[in-house]
Image: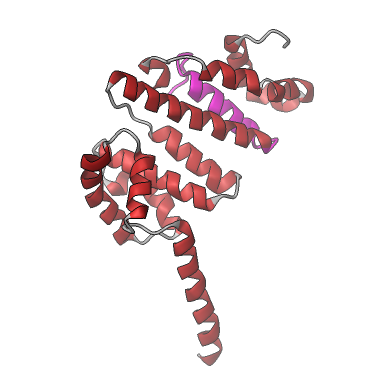
Amino acid sequence: MTDFNFEEFTKLLKDTSWLIKNNNLRRDVYHQFNNVFTYLSREDWPEDKLKERHEYSKDAVFQNIAEGYFRLGFVEKAFFEYSKLIYDLWYEKAIEYQVRKKKRIHKGMQLHQSAQLYHEALNRPDKAWDYYLAALIEDIIDGRQVVESQAYRALLRLGLAEKNLFVIRDEVQIQIKKIGKMNPLDIVDSLKESFLIPSYQEVESIDNVKLSRAKRIWPQL
């Protein structure tokens, strides 16, 4: 793998079972990351390359790489970090496309998968919090009901009160008028700055206080 060929690399990454068994080849895949990232960074990608797919497609250039790295992350954790970086780049390229074409495209997969990686693989629940919120907002913008969003269930598990989720639903339309609907991460920042939703640290602090009180009360029962 001396001369980098993106299409051949994508085919190789698709066969995760073979890479898991072959340490040398997996090491080559690991060292090709800079080439992959450079290739994906350098172009103004058309919409068909940026859309999420529910089945394998050679046009899903970002999704194929991100998912391939994700699968390898169960063997070597560093690939989880690579997967997150590709999901983030895919999101950035989608934002660039929106600005360029004045047209919104759905970015829920990038946001939700980045959140999942932060939460379950990289031990960064604070970052997962913001990305799950952005994924929920993305679904709301596209007309999905709050309770139908995967991010809704993830945020409940992280400790966000259900009433806050419906505050977000009601506030999204207001925020869209202020800052637009292209970048839900910007809407998350605006909601937090307006104290309309708590940060993860605030929720965690409240949970710790409740736990401390319960420990004091329990012996008296």
Q: Which sits in the foreground, 204 or 64?
A: 204
Looking at this rendering, what residue extends furthest in the right direction? 24
In the rendering, at what x and y percent does residue 163 appear?
29, 61
Quadrant of the rendered image containing residue 33: top right
Q: Is residue 199 above or below residue 22?
A: below
In the rendering, at what x and y percent does residue 208 appear?
52, 71
Q: Is residue 127 above or below residue 219?
A: above
Q: Which sits in the foreground, 125 or 15?
A: 125
Which residue corresponds to the image point at 62% horizontal and 14% vertical from the top-left? 9
Looking at this rendering, what residue extends furthest in the bottom direction? 220
Which residue corresponds to the image point at 43% horizontal and 24% vertical from the top-left? 93
In the rendering, at what x and y percent does residue 162 appear?
33, 59
Quadrant of the rendered image containing residue 149: top left
Which portion, as a residue range, is magenta?
Answer: 54-77
Display colour scheme: secondary structure
- Horizontally, residue 165 falls left or right of residue 45, namely left
In the rendering, at what x and y percent does residue 161 appear?
36, 62
Q: Is residue 73 magenta?
A: yes
**Quadrant placement of the N terminus:** top right
Q: Is residue 18 magenta?
A: no
